[in-house]
Amino acid sequence: MKKTGLCLAGLCVFALLLSVVAVHAQDNASVAGTWELTMAAPQGGGGGGQGGGSPQPQTLTLKQDGANITGTLAGGRGGDTAVTGTVTGNDITWTVQRQGRSGNTMTLTYKGTVSGDSITGSMSGGQMARDFTAKRTSK
């Protein structure tokens, strides 16, 4: 009888430890707020951009519900564009649909790493690929 009780207590402790580890593993970075996103203009005028030049700031506004994010990206070559994505730990990914110069719609995918009030990463879509940085300006 004592062995059964001891085994049951051991199983309860093991289950409790597993649940603590699982909850901790699911902690996602907090990304809600307004961010200033800066991406260098394409160099040499290739890829359909506007040539080399100074960084082009954009405003990224995010809402967060657990791992899911929604919001808008404003500036650059377009008006407010809808953002959808996810946060897993410190990894963030979101996509936007932008109208190309030829009238085609393209999907741009942003992938980055969150560190406090900063995000560093890269954007890709079509034949474009650029690095970006973002700084949170308000929560």
Image: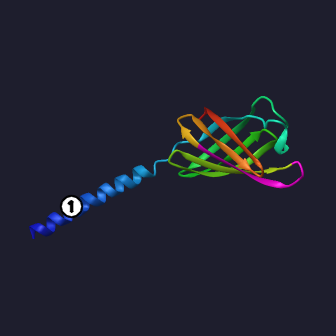
Tell which of 1 and 98 is nearer to you.
98
* Residue type beneath disc 1: Gly
Pinpoint residue 49: horizontal percent, then vertical percent. 83, 41
Residue drawn at x 85%, y 44% as measured from the top left: 48
With respect to residue 123, does 118 lie above or below?
A: above
Tell which of 86 and 53 is nearer to you.
53
Q: Is residue 79 left or right of residue 85?
A: right
Pinpoint residue 114: horizontal percent, then vertical percent. 55, 40
Prevalent SS, magenta region: strand
Q: Which residues are magenta?
A: 101-112
Residue drawn at x 53%, y 35% as measured from the top left: 116
| Residue hosting label 1 | 10
Tell which of 43 and 93 is nearer to you.
43
Q: Quadrant of residue 43?
A: top right
Residue 15 located within the stretch drawn in magenta: no
Q: Is residue 116 left or right of residue 111?
A: left
Q: Is residue 94 left or right of residue 53?
A: left
With respect to residue 10, does 32 lie above or below?
A: above
| Secondary structure category for the residue under label 1 | helix
Location of the C terminus by quadrant is top right
Q: Residue furthest right?
A: 102
